[in-house]
Amino acid sequence: MSEKFSPALRLADLNDFIAPSQNCIVSLNSSSRAKSESLREKKAKESFVGTKAQDEKVTISLKDCLACSGCVTSAETVMLEKQSLDEFLSHCRNSEEKVIVSVSPQSRASLAAFFDISPTQVLRKLTSLFKSVGVEALYDTSSSRDLSLIESCNEFVSRYRKYESSGGKECESNLPVLSSACPGWICYAEKTLGSFILPYISSVKSPQQAIGSAIKHHMVQKLGFKPYNVYHVTVMPCYDKKLEAVRDDFTFSTDQKDIAEVDSVLTTGEVLDLIQSKSIDFLALEDAALDRMLTNVDEKDQLYGVSGGSGGYAETIFRHAAKELFNVEINGPVEFRTLRNSDFREAVLEVDGKQVLKFALCYGFRNLQNIVSKVKRGKCEYHFVEVMACPSGCLNGGGQIKAKKGQSGKELLQQLESIYMQDVLIASPFHNPIAKTLYDEWLGQPGSDNAKKFLHTEYHPVVKSIASQLHNW
């Protein structure tokens, strides 16, 4: 299963394991003696001394393994399987829970390509499919992506102004800003790069976590539910999103219960597995009405959103910064010039013959390494970099549906790129009525205290044990 993760995440020690001298970070809690005894020590005693276990059963979660990086993180892949179709369907059958599904536009495009229908039809048929198995509502993460983009625009302009006024000396105003929507890149940065790179990474949550925050903190009240009675599932183009969902940073407590913003992640391929395993004729499914509360669809049933198969961060922020900082209106698409390869492109804004904005799209691990090296040496010429771990970005995520027989991966990617915005109206996130309502009712203004509380996060360098590093060496 590990090969399904992005290359950056696999290189971030996905195959670590506990060395013989290491302790697991999880300790037993049922007695004072057990509090200081690790799980590994206990198992060793039971195995070699024959001690019978008297303590309560201990559960190790994926969160625990991610916090350690010295653990069998092939165990990460094993435990990720708990974010499975069977687990999802069991929650759908639970009458005490309300299951809500959020679908990414990349997954929508992948299913549209596979079934040769439009993205709108996919969303309607998915609504029909999921509601038939007990799902309460199905939303479109294009709505939360607009929230993330608005916050990212505000964050970049703020950092740029501080950077220019301080001569680049203030830590909180570090440039370039590196995008944070790709969990494979974030995991690699935390586990492998550490403290020097983290201040450059945007603090804005990904669209997956933004919609999770909106649902669990705000929408549940409007729907009349309790956060702990809502099971929120996202459909995403990559396996790395499963790791993102279980981060402690994306949980909160209420009524003495720990609540996750996103409870489970299904990849696009897993949704196809559901359709095929149940022998569902997807094309024959009813085109159900869309749940408009958190779905980018207008009064004419037209889908809308930004272009850009990996979220459109660089283009949206570039356009906003040009207007906000230099009063330059960019009409039409931003032109990104291809440099060393198709996965590394740049856009430049000149004012009075001077380069004032320089942005880059950086996809794939090799390009990512080059940017990191430049940042480390203080030689990075860019103000913002849209970073994605997968070559060709999110449309090419490891959780997407694979090419059909006789179709090359390149041909499939070209098909996805053409389908992605096939019947989607390009619209500014700042004009999104859903985003405006959420700011009015819940968040306040972009960059406000509430917006920072619910739509921003922090990153933490993972300190490895010496034993693990020596073993890997």
Image (cartoon, rainbow, N blue to C red):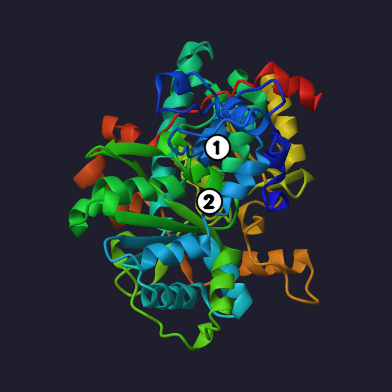
Residue 191 appears left or right of 343: left
Residue at the image position 65 percent from the left and 19 percent from the top: 465
Query: Which amino acid lies under the numbered mark 1 shown in the image of this protein?
Result: Ser
In the rendering, at what x and y percent does residue 323 appear?
Answer: 44, 39
Q: Is residue 353 visible?
A: no
41 above or below 326?
Answer: above
Query: Which amino acid lies under the numbered mark 2 shown in the image of this protein?
Result: Gly
327 above or below 135?
Answer: above
Question: Which corner quadrant of the image does residue 324 belong to?
Answer: top left
Q: Is residue 211 visible?
A: yes
133 above or below 144?
Answer: below
98 above or below 117?
Answer: above
Q: Secondary structure at mark 1?
A: loop
In the rendering, at what x and y percent does residue 339 appear?
Answer: 76, 42
Q: Are marks 1 and 2 in contact (CB under 8 Å)?
A: yes
Q: Nearer the viewer, residue 424 or 408?
A: 408
In the rendering, at what x and y percent does residue 443 appear?
Answer: 26, 40
The numbered mark at residue 179 is 1
In the rendering, at what x and y percent does residue 338 appear?
Answer: 74, 47
Residue at the image position 50 percent from the left and 64 percent from the top: 86
The numbered mark at residue 311 is 2
Residue 19 appears left or right of 66: right
User: Neighbour class for label 2 at 10 Å: few (<14), some, many (≥20)?
Assistant: many
Alpha-carbon span between mark 1 and mark 2: 10 Å
Q: Nearer the viewer, residue 242 or 291?
A: 242
Q: Earlier in the sequence, mark 1 or mark 2?
A: 1
